[in-house]
Image (cartoon, helix red, strand yellow):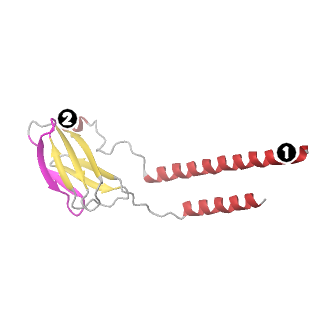
Amino acid sequence: MKNKLVFAILAVLLVLSCLSISGVSAHRLHVVHWISEIEIEAYFGGGTPCRDANVTVYDKVGNLYMKGETDDKGKFSFPPKIGMEEYRVVVEAVHMPGHKAETVINLSQEAAGASAGGMGTEMPLYTRAIAGFGYLIGLAGAAMLYMGWKQKKRYDGISRD
């Protein structure tokens, strides 16, 4: 009985802690680009702009095309070179070392509408939070199943004696 009470209290605390989580500012770095003058935007998972980040632009074969820094809004733009259809853009956060992202900008695909704006297929934050909550509920269910099996085994042993 004591184990069930302790487990119930822990389960309630777990649910309350999950519900009390407010806006998350993850450290994932995203890069988005637009074409005219090619403009990229670098930001972290919570939407915070990646300010003063080092930006390095390479051509298709890996030669350095341009270097620069993002502005206060996490944006950097550069003019496309005639005849160059593909760029690899690398962004490194200065204020948060170790955070680095890169994207490949293919102008021929962009013109054909084949690219989705450089975002990829990442799940939105709320979807990841719901999936994580479901994972925790599954773990709690497995723990309850194990405790029930253990209790049944103990009571079966007592009633046979």
- Residue 69: image quadrant is bottom left
Indicate yes or no whether the magenta region holds residue 68: yes
Residue at the image point whose x is 70% and y is 46% from the top: 146
Where does the image place residue 67, in percent across and percent down from the top left? Answer: 13, 51
Where does the image place residue 72, in percent across and percent down from the top left? Answer: 22, 64
Q: Residue furthest front?
A: 161
Where does the image place residue 16, in percent across and percent down from the top left? Answer: 59, 63
Q: Which of the pair 149/130 is nearer the observer?
A: 149
Indicate yes or no whether the magenta region holds residue 67: yes
Q: Residue furthest left?
A: 82
Q: What range is drawn magenta here?
A: 59-81
Q: Residue furthest right?
A: 161
Which residue is disc 2 drawn over? 108
Q: Looking at the rendered structure, which numbered label has been put on residue 157?
A: 1
Question: From this viewpoint, is residue 79 visible?
Answer: no
Q: Which of the pair 151/50 is nearer the observer?
A: 151
Nearest to N terminus: mark 2 or mark 1? 2
- In the image, 85: left or right of 97? left
